[in-house]
Image (cartoon, rainbow, N blue to C red):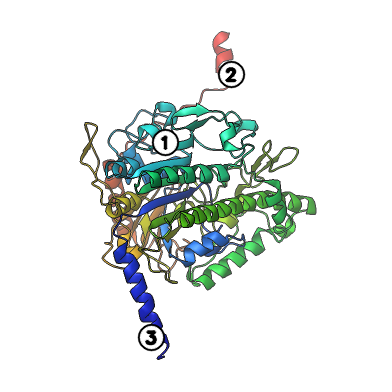
Amino acid sequence: MTKFVPSVLVWVALFSTSVCCASDRPNVVVILVDDMGFSDIGPYGSEIPTPHLDSLAAGGVKFSQFYNTGRCCPTRASLLTGLYSHQAGIGWMTTNQGLPGYAGRLNGRCVTIPEVLGAAGYFTAMTGKWHVGFKQGVTPWSRGFDRSLNLPAGGLHFSNQTGSKGGTKLFLNGEEIARDDPQFNPPWYGSDLWTEQGIQFIDEAIAKKKPFFWYLAHVAPHFPCMAPEATIAKYRGKYMQGWDVLREERYARQIELGLIDESWKLEPRPDDVPAWNSLSSEEQRRYDDMMAIYAAMIEEVDKNVGKLVAALQERGQLDNTLILFLADNGGNAEAGVNGRYEGEQPGDPHSNVFIGKCWAHLNNTPFRKYKHHNHEGGTASPLIAHWPAGIRPRDEWIETPTHLIDLMTTCVDLGEADYPAEFNGNAIIPAQGQSLQPLLTGEGVFADRPLFWEHEGNAAIRVGDRKLVRLGLKGEWELFDLKADRTEQNDLAAENVDEVDSLRRQWRLWAKSANVLPKPAPKTKKRKNQGKKAAK
């Protein structure tokens, strides 16, 4: 004990010195991955090796109850603006549906993090997937980014990619540029490109002696799933255990890590997902290869996290850089039980692979539902925060419910910026979130508040540990106690009618105030052969 106490005091003194001497405002790097499930990285229970993310988590803090919106475009809108996505104009995707909450682009009543931090002297950059209204004229360079290398939306992983996303254009600082431009050292893989170009942008910030904000929006592991063959080869055969065994193993690791409570029941395998042992050997090999491709994409992202951290370290920037790693929605079941496995060499730049519902069920361990939905499987995201000068590493999980809306307020707080009441002649909607600084540093108070969701009629409200959630516009409201049952297995609605009614009314008041309601009228389907009948 006599030897231990001084060492602790020395460590505390060093940590305190690093904090007090870091009077300069921190750099901020936000790393967003696309269509990754809650349990797909090591700190959250995955079997996929992610040593660089493991290191960030060990040297920082981990959030167990961080939320996104459940879908790509709304998440990006909310992250960039600190508003609920409908308030920013993107309640659905990027189609203009003729209502304020569904304009399909960032509107004039929001400001973005780079607009706010740029006004406070930050150098701002983004690389990767944009997808908040590019075709309607909303671009990175028109919404505050000094430097950008971006796709209008997503889906492109290789410079020589063909298929449905093969015509995707690439833009450098507002100008279209050839994907095989020599400066990018083609052929390239996207996770490398977004990271390496961002590091070049950082060098510009350092030369200008400015703090920087870098939004790194990976396209991986979104479909079409593809990765370098050498990386895929590492994983072939590793998924022959199947989703039933692997899901139990992830669940056990999550309990061991303290991420989830052992009393929370694992979501059962859906009826339409076959038992792994019921499949033929040929079907198993097909599914194994699909997941090997997906796992390779996760490894490529993790490798580039290591590349980014090393670059910051080499430039003397790591200690005073806040790195945030998160996902835009839960695992993607859009291709159904069969998924898609197309091409002469699935996983290469000319193939078309979707991992489908069976593997999405593994991605989202231990939760219900998937991307699109407002159940936990759709909206629960990892969040890792690393900032040596400001965060004291700790093993325990931060269990406070937090949301994308909190990132703007955090940046304003740490960047000593001003969130404007008016911008470009428009009245700006007040920021909806709270600064995460008290949770990151362990100092100060993070107040309780309700959280809200809506997407495609799916809806939810969380107040404390009570969550009311609906599947689809006509679905019945379900009530869950997330303290006892975060996997949403025990619906309490029937015995708590008054509470359900109160939460439903609270959600509806928010929905009206946040441009969720009114919703666009559903599209009418033309009758088959209508044109032929009209011609007769």
Q: Secondary structure at mark 1?
A: loop
State the SS at label 2: loop
Q: What type is the residue that disc 3 sits on?
A: Val
How far apart, in angstroms, are the residues tagged by discs 3 and 2? 83 Å
Task: Pinpoint residue 240: horizontal percent, then vertical percent.
Answer: 73, 58
Number of labelled discs? 3
Q: Give me the residue at 40% from left, 27% from top.
A: 136
Q: Is residue 516 visible?
A: no
- Could you say which disc has been placed on residue 5 in the image? 3
- Drawn side of residue 527 relative to residue 439, left or right: right
Q: Amino acid at mark 2?
A: Asn
Amino acid type, mark 1: Val
Task: Tell me the quarter of the picture where residue 132 sits.
Answer: top left
Q: Which residue is mark 2?
A: 529
Disc 1 and disc 3: Cα gap in Å? Answer: 52 Å
| Mark positioned earlier in the residue sequence (2 or 1) | 1
Q: Position of residue 356 (x, y in %)?
A: 62, 47
- In the drawing, does residue 358 fall left or right of residue 369? right
